[in-house]
Image (spheres, rainbow, N blue to C red):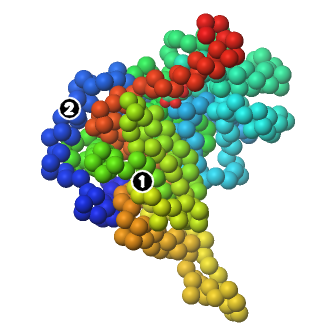
Amino acid sequence: MSLKISFQHVKKEQMVSFEENKERVAEIDRMINERSGAGSDFLGWLDYPVNYDRYEFDRILKKSEEFRNKYEILVVCGIGGSYLGARAAIDAVNGVMPKKGRMQILYLGNTLDPNYSSEILEYIKDRNFCVCVISKSGTTTETSVSFRILKEMLEDKYGKDGAREAIVAVTDKEKGALKQLADSEGYETYVLPDDIGGRFSVMTPVGLFPIACAGIDIREFMKGLQDARNDFSSPNIFENQAYQYALERNFLYEKLHYRVEMMATYEFRLKNLNEWWKQLFDESEGKLNKAVLTTSATFTTDLHSLGQFIQEGSKILYETIIYIDNPSYEVNVPYDRDNLDGLNYLAGKNLSYINRKAYEGTLEAHSETGNVPNICINLDKMDAYNIAYLFFFFMKACAMSAYLLGVNPFNQPGVEVYKKNMFHLLGKEGY
Ligand code: PA5
């Protein structure tokens, strides 16, 4: 098992009893597996790692290779669950700086911000780019508007046939405006299955296509999902770490009244993992005037800003720390003869050693001195296998956590309210 959860930095009085809750957890597990709970029509992600469409997977491998050979940039056009997982995985595995010889992945359709949009459009205009448009409904405004612009740009650049070659669409197998458009234009399409919601869809072509274009091994990615599916399949709370995390967060919220969960990582390349995780939990749980609000931080950077609040501010939050045991790269601290900065005590050490000491010191400071519960999740390394493994861990935990809270994890009725108002103000027919 490449992931280990630890409650060593959660004080005894802050820790849920597994013994007292084992039946409740087993009961919800049964409900998940029998698909008898609220929203269970959207549990397709549970078995997708083993029953995914192999033919479609091969098409993804082939087309992504073609894209990598032909174009410099892929623009992923999607919002929410239709892009956050891919972005989290690509950053986590490839890092945040563009890499020589690798396709650059950019994101549009995730905002209505004219400044950001025009910066991206300006940047790609004279470059060789292709597009993966992703929308389950096919009608999301941010995505549809951006795609209309990208499509026009591609048609002007490469002509109608060239544009057709440079566009793929991930959407519903038969419904929606994007499906209709893709069929009538003859784009290559991949399916986001009916029984998988956006924020659980990173394992489907929604995540797989952009991840493959970024040069990441999606076979390893599927393997990580499959192993996590096995490793987090036990109904027994003593054996299932995903359920342990879910149960503890429920206890901290319901019994001890913590209102905020802060996910903290020690690597910039995990910033978008934080974003994916926030969507997963907040959109799944924030209903019926309930749930913990998720927030995130990147340490040690944010220890110099949020750190003060965490240490001594109001006691509304607990932390969940993701720590990667083996970083992909090392940076050494050089020896300096003059030692004017007084740093020779670190000479010959590397940044990961210093980062780890910061992590250990912070854990102690926040949990012991600051009395902030710290749940720790340690992961071996950040590669295709491990990021997928971590995704599945959180999805399984999220389903359990939402059911413990008594909400349907798989709908998002609240998101519609702003859309209705916006459509009314924009004069859309029927609003
Ligand atoms: O998780 C979800 O369901 C949402 O975040 C959706 O992914 C998001 O709203 C985009 O929807 P669509 O894929 O229909 O464009």
Residue that mark 2 sits on: 30
Q: Nearer the viewer, residue 157 or 322?
A: 322
Seen at 36% across and 70% down, the residue is 368
Q: Is residue 341 left or right of residue 43?
A: right
- Residue 246: give x, y in percent of width and height: 31, 45
Q: Is residue 12 above or below residue 420?
A: below
Q: Between marks 2 and 1, how big is the CA–CA gap?
A: 33 Å
Residue 317 seen in render: yes
**At which x and y percent is residue 37?**
27, 25
Query: What residue lies at 48% left-to-right and 26% top-to-bottom?
Result: 414
Asked if the residues shown at circle 2 and circle 1 are in contact, with their CB atoms under 8 angstroms apart, the answer is no
Query: Where does the image place residue 27, in percent across and percent down from the top left?
Result: 18, 34
- Residue 283, numbered circle: none
Percent coordinates x, y for residue 309 in the rendering: 51, 61
Residue at 14% in and 40% down: 23
Q: Residue furthest bottom?
A: 338
Q: Residue furthest top?
A: 430
Residue under pointer 1: 316
Q: Nearer the viewer, residue 37 or 377?
A: 37
Q: Nearer the viewer, mark 2 or mark 1?
A: 1
**Amino acid, disc 1:** Ile
For the N terminus, which image quadrant?
bottom left
Q: Earlier in the sequence, mark 2 or mark 1?
A: 2
Give, as a three-letter code, the residue at label 2: Arg
